[in-house]
Amino acid sequence: MLFTSPFQPEPPFTHGQVPRTAVLLCNLGTPDEPTAPAVRRYLAEFLSDPRVVEIPRLLWLLILHGIILRTRPAKSAAKYASVWTPEGSPLKIWTEKQAKLLQGWLGQRNHQVKVRWAMRYGSTSIASQLDAMKADGVTRVLIVPAYPQYSGPTTASVCDAVFAWAAKTRAIPELRFINRYHDDAGYISALGASVRRYWMAHGKPDQLVMSFHGVPARTLQLGDMYHCECFKTARLLAQELGLSKDQYKVTFQSRLGRAKWLEPYTEPSLIAMGQAGVKRVDVICPGFTSDCLETLEEINMEAREAFLHAGGQAFHYIPCLNDDPDWITALCNLAQKHLQGWPTQETPDAAALQASRAAALALGAKQ
């Protein structure tokens, strides 16, 4: 009987291998291109994740493949096309840039670690980047989700992907995870500085709206702390900006389906403000660290149109942190804190060390 191992083949273990440390920055994902087939592939993977949609599995798969994947990809592709750049998806561009900047920031602090980026859904996958790290001799990996607030459909799903990869891996690297940083002082300070810079250039609004991505309301009763962490981020940012409770509003966007999601909803709230005579609103999305479809199209296009159509006079979208130096510094501080105890300064590899010793012996023999 032929024995088949469940584990992926790996190079033979070699003694004297230099241990290396790496950081993996993980974001949600994006289609490869703004076309219906590409969006269909992306949505099929994203919406098949039981962390994302928590209804009876068979029923949901029937809805997904029988209705959603037949009707939604073309509409979503048009939305993606409206924010696509010559370099590709904004989410991919910003995530890749953040990873490069993070490696540079850490390097300036004498941490010789490799920083890679990955997407939970679509390319470049978490598994492929972990494979590449192992091929580079990495033995310790810090997983950094791009989500400040912890939630099952986001942060926990990243963990699922890492564990699924580990389940097929013989020699698993040491793993650490950053689960949340919704109240991190550096993150809050970076958000506050970005808002103040915007207001210095454009003036202040009548109301600041902090829009977070929504999740089904039942997740709060099921033990997900996302709702509370969003409100804490908002409260801390308001304190950073010196805002009173009547000067800002917390809302939730991107509702999917007919079930009740976390409230209040962003677009209906903006419509109500416009109808009530609020002249100018500024909207910021603190739960997103990179601009993407949900910020550039859903907020800066759809929500803008809804507010202005309801009677509002001025709508301002404050961009995500993206490559803001204050944010990269905060991200570097987070990574550095969670890397404590791991060696991050590489030593000469075994071959180089052996060659150095041989050269020294040869020199000694000549003398």
Image: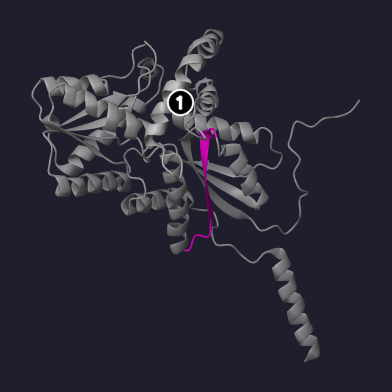
Q: Does the rendering let one see residue 281?
A: yes
Q: Quadrant of the C terminus?
A: bottom right
Residue 53: x percent and y percent? Answer: 47, 18
Residue lying at the far right of the rendered structure: 1
How busy is the neighbourhood of tag 1: few (under 14 within 10 Å), some, or many (20 plus)?
some
Q: Is residue 76 left or right of residue 46?
A: left
Q: Does the rendering let one see residue 149?
A: no
For the point 53% across and 56% down, the residue is: 113
- Kindly indicate the quadrant of the structure image that contains residue 78: top left
For the point 76% across and 48% down, the residue is: 11
Q: Give the residue type at disc 1.
A: Pro
Please name whichever residue, 104 or 173, is drawn nearer the observer in this view of the structure: 104
Q: Is residue 321 left or right of residue 142?
A: left
- Kindly indicate the quadrant of the structure image that contains residue 173: top right
Q: Quadrant of the N terminus?
A: top right
Please name whichever residue, 281 or 310, is drawn nearer the observer in this view of the structure: 310
Q: Is residue 197 left or right of residue 65?
A: left
Residue tagged 1: 153
Q: Secondary structure at mark 1?
A: helix
Please name whichever residue, 277 or 170, is drawn nearer the observer in this view of the structure: 277
Q: Is residue 31 left or right of residue 274?
A: right
Residue 339: x percent and y percent? Answer: 49, 51
Q: Which residues are magenta?
A: 109-122
- Kindly indicate the quadrant of the structure image that contains residue 286: top left
Colour pattern of the rendering: one colour
Residue 73: x percent and y percent? Answer: 47, 22
Q: Is residue 19 above or below residue 262?
A: below
For the point 76% across and 40% down, the residue is: 9
Is 346 covered by the magenta stretch? no
